Amino acid sequence: MKLKLFFSAIVLTFAVNLAGQNLENLPRAFTSTGTECYVYTVQAKDGLYGIAKKFDVSQEDIIALNPRVKDGLKAGQPLYIPVKQDAPAKKDTPQTPPPTVSTSDEYVGLVNYQVEAKQTLYSIAKRFGVNQEDIIKYNPQAKTTVKEGEILRIPVRKQQNYENSSSNPALNYTPSKQEPNLTDIYGNPYSKYLTHTIQPKETLYSISKKYNVFVEDIVNANPDLESVLHVGETLRIPIKTDYAPPTFETLSIAKEVTTIRIAFLMPFSSGNLDMNNDRFLEFYSGALIAINKAKQNGASFEIYTYDTNRNLESVNAILNKTEMKNVDFIVGPAYTNQVGAVANFAKQNKIFTIVPFSSKVQGIAANPYLFQFNPSTETEIDFISTKLSSGDLQNANIIFIKPNNLDVGDEGYVWATSLENALTKKGKYSETTVWTTPADNTEIQTLLRSGVKNILIFMTDNYANVQPYVATINTLSAANINLSLYIRYSWLNYNFKNTETIYISPFNNTLNTSDLNVYQKDFSKYFAWKPTTTNPRYDLLGYDLTNCFINQLQTYGNVFAKDKKTIDYSAGVQSQFDFERTNTNSGFENQKIYFINVSGK
């Protein structure tokens, strides 16, 4: 099968690690304890895991020097990365040891300083009591000129009594004679200044509380301060002698993931006679696009792909493979009869697993390693009963219809009966009727009410039971009766003409155009065929889910869901996720459901 062979080639291509980055030309700095660091500027789409991988250090090492990265990374943000002992020497740094200086003159760290109006390199060097050459060493661009507002890294000597008041590399410095002799609004003296970089959503009030100073004192220390704070700008914060720096909790990663290992369990083979078999190939292709995007940002992967067919024997044979116990994450299986075996394996080996298709995940209530994308029947019932009994639909007229040839074992009948009971518990009244003659609208018309929305819900999963009634319902809709037909998700491809329809889905029917265009450009780059464009798109489901869990693995390692109650993801092209669990011993179920209304044509 050509398509299958093509996918195999893609897997092998995606399993190759990215080459290491040359670090020789990055600027370097020293902390107050003498630790040499690279000064790295965060790039768009950088992740903490990817940066740690580039520099061959742990994420904890980066967090220790940059505590704010726990709040997220921002393009343009400077990071201090510890230099490993065997790192290549910087090209513009002499290979011989620097000139010997007395202990009292030894540089012990760097401070960030914002150049003020009319200042020169000479005046700044004089102000801090250092040589111009020393400033140029850490700021090569300053050799030609310095600009107002520019941030320079100034070396600090021991004899100046510079103190490291926090683990943030933006160190404090003691004011020189040229600095104003500030006091607070009560006349109490400040002893030094701290450079603070403005973060998103910060205000002068929140910054003043952080450093235990007054807003007025920050304003006085920054005479050029504008009325609106700008993210990334620096403020001079006057600090008292009794200032206690904030403490930061170090992120604990029980098992750091250096190479992310993902296993896909999907029914790929042509031996499957399932009419929907292509959707599994499309899902997998979207997942590969997400993996490639992460690789471009520095991540490394090992991808294991297995054809599960539709039987349990195939799945058991896969689970017995040695490498399966060493993966960090499992995607699959596709069929309900295979879920139990994979769920037990995941729990025994403590491997988080996403079940992307089934809404009946065996054992999820007692298995903390399972993720279920499709909301359960109970979750659906609770969601739609709330929608139909509140807001704009609070006064809607709900009519449950038993069609001809109804089988009481029909899952749609069981579902509708449960919804009817849930509405009753919420105090919402509904009607139930038997519509015996599809062409006769009088049977249903007597139950319709004017001035409110009338919602018809057929108590069946089988569209063939509903089809005989559609023409009559269209006639009623054309007569300007405020009427909506609730449809099952599997009925979306049928034409209901001028009748308004409503349904619920874990897929958003309105896609983000810009994100979709970027994705489709990547897809056409790697695949010589086009995915199905009808809703839902299973390639986008694979893309969104894989992006979600790669993000978790990169940030927290393969224990990302331990002790968490919720995991949210709002950056999906087609779907956002709201995974929740009821307790620490249960698995996660996606609670994100869209209530979709489609007007009649």
Image (cartoon, rainbow, N blue to C red):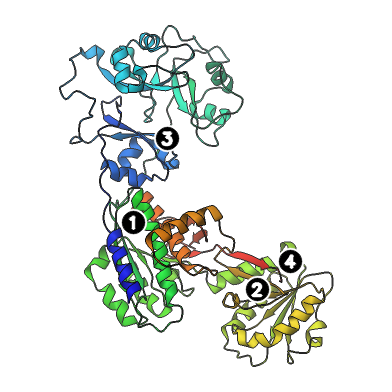
| 156 vs 596: above or below | above
The disc, 4 or 3, on the residue closer to the chain's N-terminal end is 3
Q: Nearer the viewer, mark 4 or mark 3?
A: 3
Q: Residues within 10 Å of mark 1 (few under 14, many from 20)?
A: many
Q: Residues within 10 Å of mark 4 (few under 14, many from 20)?
A: some
Residue matched to label 1: 558
Whole-angstrom CA distance, mark 1 to mark 2, is 39 Å
Whole-angstrom CA distance, mark 4 to mark 2, is 15 Å
The disc, 4 or 2, on the residue closer to the chain's N-terminal end is 4
Q: Pick the quarter of the image with the N terminus.
A: bottom left
Residue matched to label 3: 77
Q: Secondary structure at mark 2?
A: helix
* Location of residue 569 in the rendering, given as x and y in whole percent from the top left corner: 49, 55
* Location of residue 232 in the rendering, given as x and y in whole percent from the top left corner: 48, 31
Whole-angstrom CA distance, mark 3 to mark 1, is 27 Å
Q: For the residues labelled 4 and 3, say whether their Cβ atoms are less than 8 Å apart.
A: no
* Three-letter code, disc 3: Gln
Whole-angstrom CA distance, mark 3 to mark 2, is 51 Å
Whole-angstrom CA distance, mark 4 to mark 3, is 48 Å
Residue located 23% across and 71% down the image: 321
**Numbered marks: total:** 4
* Three-letter code, disc 2: Ala
Q: For the residues labelled 1 and 2, say whether their Cβ atoms are less than 8 Å apart.
A: no
| 459 vs 436: above or below | above
| 539 vs 467: above or below | above
The disc, 4 or 1, on the residue closer to the chain's N-terminal end is 4
In the picture, the disc for residue 393 is: 4
Residue matched to label 2: 422
